Amino acid sequence: MKHLLNTLYVTTQGAYLSRDGETVLVRVEKETKLQVPIHTLGGIVCFGQVSCSPPLMELCGERNVTISFLSEYGRFWARVEGPVSGNVLLRREQYRRADSETSSADIARVIVTAKVANGRTVLLRALRDHPDNSGASELEDAVLRLARPPLDNMNALLSFLYTLLVHDVRSALETVGLDPAVGYLHRDRPGRPGLALDLMEELRPFIADRLALSLVNLKQIKGSGFIKTETGAVMMDDTTRKELLVAYQKRKQEEIQHPFLGEKIAVGLIPYVQSLLLARYLRGDLDGYPPFIWK
């Protein structure tokens, strides 16, 4: 089984990342704040005004460590990655299936089914864990409608988590040799990682939505941690964003029993396992793609 590697999130504005042998140095105002061995990293995510040296980019490219650049509040800007790897025959089969409406519908159907099932499970668990919550009646309605009230702060929180999750799913797909741009539920669009968005549909209730609900219910994240801009957009402040990143990393370290494999894995490995199962299905090793359905 693949080992879960860490993701280095850099949020300090003005930070500079450089290479020192086989390690990543994080400097702020010429002072080294952190030094991380490259072999422990699966990715680096830079928020806002964070820059990287060319030698570090070379090292990351050689070691398949993707560097992603996002705005300070989580909007995707760009990625730096090494040469594309993967089995050309697998990718050709992926493209053939994407060109077939029938094959695309078969894969999209199980993904949507898993998304709805997992979303309903998250809501039911929220009701069970917090039966006296003042919003219990709204959650009961949501279980029936499979939708939530459009709370601005919650949407901002979820949007940030989805950005982190799609980064992990995209990296997992590339690791097993699939093209993250060619999906089945999300059709081709320049610049959109369609297949990564496909797999994220079934994973986000369990990995992102559940985490968001837990943080709010436990009051680890509060309404005072959000800022409303002049345009009406809602964003997290620095403290809240860092709290969320720490919680997301801890969530990825938790272990569950995978419903299809029947063995314990870290939550952070779920994107990789699902990518691997999809690749096995496309190769013909499995009769159907087994989506991740949490119970």
Image (cartoon, rainbow, N blue to C red):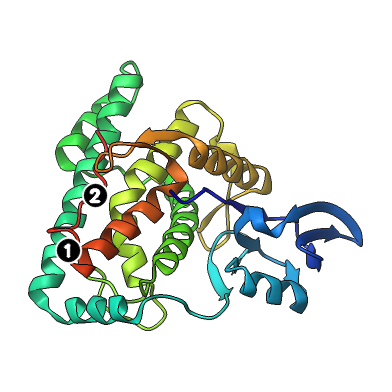
Q: Residue at x 17, y 82 (%)?
A: 99
CA gap, disc 2 to disc 1? 13 Å
Q: What kind of residue is marked 2? A: Lys
> Disc 1 marks which residue?
107
Q: Is residue 155 left or right of residue 277?
A: right
> Disc 2 marks which residue?
115
Rendering coords of residue 182 (x, y %): 30, 76
Q: Residue at x 14, y 58 (%)?
A: 288
Q: Secondary structure at mark 1?
A: helix
Near-viewer residue (126 or 115): 115
Judged from this view, the residue extending furthest toward the right is: 30
Q: Is residue 33 left or right of residue 185?
A: right
Q: Secondary structure at mark 2?
A: helix
Q: Nearer the viewer, mark 2 or mark 1?
A: 1
Near-viewer residue (106 or 232): 106
Q: What kind of residue is marked 1? A: Ile
- Neighbourhood count class around disc 1 (C-alpha, 10 Å): few under 14, some 14–19, many 20 upward: many
Judged from this view, the residue extending furthest toward the top is: 132
Rendering coords of residue 264 (x, y %): 38, 35
- Neighbourhood count class around disc 2 (C-alpha, 10 Å): few under 14, some 14–19, many 20 upward: many
Q: Residue at x 24, y 43 (%)?
A: 260
Q: Of callouts 2 and 1, which one flags the residue occurring earlier in the amino acid sequence?
A: 1
**Quarter of the image that includes the C terminus:** top left
Q: Examine the rendered structure and indicate whether residue 87 appears above or below residue 63.
A: below
Q: Examine the rendered structure and indicate whether residue 263 appears above or below residue 15.
A: above
Rendering coords of residue 66 (x, y %): 58, 68
